Image (cartoon, grey):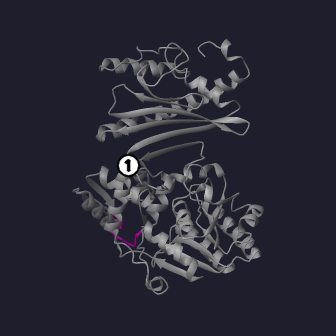
Amino acid sequence: MEVLVTGATGYVGGRLVPRLLEAGHRVRVLVRDPARLEGRPWAGQVEVVRGSLEDPAALRQALSGVEAAYYLVHAMLSEGDFPRAEERQARTFAQVAREAGLGHVVYLGGLLPREGRPSPHLQSRARVGEILRAHLPTTEFRAGPIVGSGSASFEMVRYLTERLPVMVAPRWVLNPVSPIAIRDVLAYLLLALSKGPAGVVEIGAPPLTFQGMMEAYARVRGLRRLILPVPVLAPRLAALWVGLVTPIPNRLALPLVEGILHPLVADTGKAQAPFPEVRPLPYEEAVALALRRVALGEVETRWSGALYGRAYFLEDREGIVREVRSLHARTTPEALFRVFSSLGGERGWLVWGWAWALRGFLDRLVGGPGLRRGRRHPQELLPGEALDFWRVERVEPGRLLRLRAEMRLPGKAWLEWQALPEGEGARLVQTAYFEPVGLTGFLYWWLLYPLHRRIFSDLARAIAREAEAAARLPWSGREGG
């Protein structure tokens, strides 16, 4: 078939596309930024249309001639009113798709509770499904927590269980839910093309409580964990705690937490008849498979894929925290590289000089190198040489510099800059990495993070300003550059 996939850069869509290609389908993808497809092994095998679900012209181009389309987008991480944004996107897509004569849309939504009011996120997912079904022949799969390497639900359970030997949890962790392995979600999505529109289909593995999910994870990992449910813990407070302990940002943690305030159990009877080929993997087996993928470094996609393209984000990935700053500069990649590769030594670090000096002094007090090593050359850096309390780990002239910290830390740290061409200018991507060791490392990062956040932000802006100024002046005339 000729198939359109929306959400191809997301967690599910990024895994679905290669499987559609393997099955022999011709795939077209609609993406806001085609550059986000770079590096994916299947990028050269798909037709790419640039645009969004709120762009009728791009949708007409994307839907022209296709027989089926996958609707795999959400707006939870967008600024503002995400339910309104999701409804607007669904209406625009449905109108253009109906005009184009689309024969089948496959949508992945969420399970709804049998009792109690659904969370705003689940209400919005249901509303999108209603709009699509009202205008188009639709298969709407409703799923609970998706379990797979890199999924938000898996990461939340993994980090809570790994980091907290004893947990005081809200009583609603005793509510039953129907999780489902990502491999089974993909199987249903693929089979839907050959089955035709099937309406609402609830999917999931045998249910267990959220507490049972954490306990099952602990068993797979050989951990002993004590979970103590308590009567009162507000969802927002629980979401803040999840955001602190796990990689999941509060904006995503809140809908995940709100989604399990009531039982979410799938009625899988309708799925068994048209999809007898799929036998959902029990939760514990899904966890074991996800952990193997993580251990082998075979994580195809992650929940945080939607964060790329933001000017700033903080991510805790496989135990390594990443603090990323990304900004456009009216200069060249080479000018950016010259600035960040000349930092340190006598020139210093452009901003917060007293903080760098204090950090160097404290490092020397505990036996570290401090800032006394300086740098060998004011402009040139070579892999393996010292730079203040850093070690140059990687240099790609004109493009990349990565420094590894050698100051005394309860963990490992790196600081990296990339200079990438973008339009008539360049994009600076500055990333601070920290791999904490034990509880001390975890507390070190979060206690100092308010200061680090300000320093990293100011440093990235200062590098961009310096490079923009350098692009207007001969570099040889600039001190330290």
The correct choice, above or below, for 394 with respect to 267 in the image is above
33 in magenta: no
Q: Quadrant of the C terminus?
A: top right
Q: Position of residue 47 (x, y in %)?
A: 67, 60
Q: Is residue 13 visible?
A: yes
x 52%, y 39%: residue: 324
Q: Is residue 111 visible?
A: no
Q: Viewer-proximal residue, 101 or 277?
A: 277
Q: Residue furthest bottom?
A: 273
Q: Badge 1: few (under 14), some or many (20 or more) residues near its Cα, within 10 Å?
A: some
Q: Amino acid at mark 1?
A: Val
x 39%, y 48%: residue: 318
The reply, left or right, for residue 395 in relation to residue 360 is right
Q: Quadrant of residue 208?
A: bottom left
How many numbered marks does the figure carry? Answer: 1
Q: Viewer-proximal residue, 334 or 221?
A: 334
Q: Position of residue 388 (x, y in %)?
A: 43, 19
Q: Viewer-proximal residue, 232 or 46?
A: 46
Q: Quadrant of residue 207?
A: bottom left
The reply, left or right, for residue 236 in relation to residue 220 is right
The correct choice, above or below, for 244 with respect to 67 in the image is above
Q: Position of residue 480 (x, y in %)?
A: 59, 14
Q: Quadrant of the N terminus?
A: bottom right
171 in magenta: yes
The correct choice, above or below, for 287 with respect to 264 in the image is above
Q: Position of residue 242 (x, y in %)?
A: 40, 53
Q: Which residue is mark 1?
A: 245
Q: Which residues are magenta?
A: 170-180
x 40%, y 56%: residue: 155
Under tag 1, what secondary structure? helix
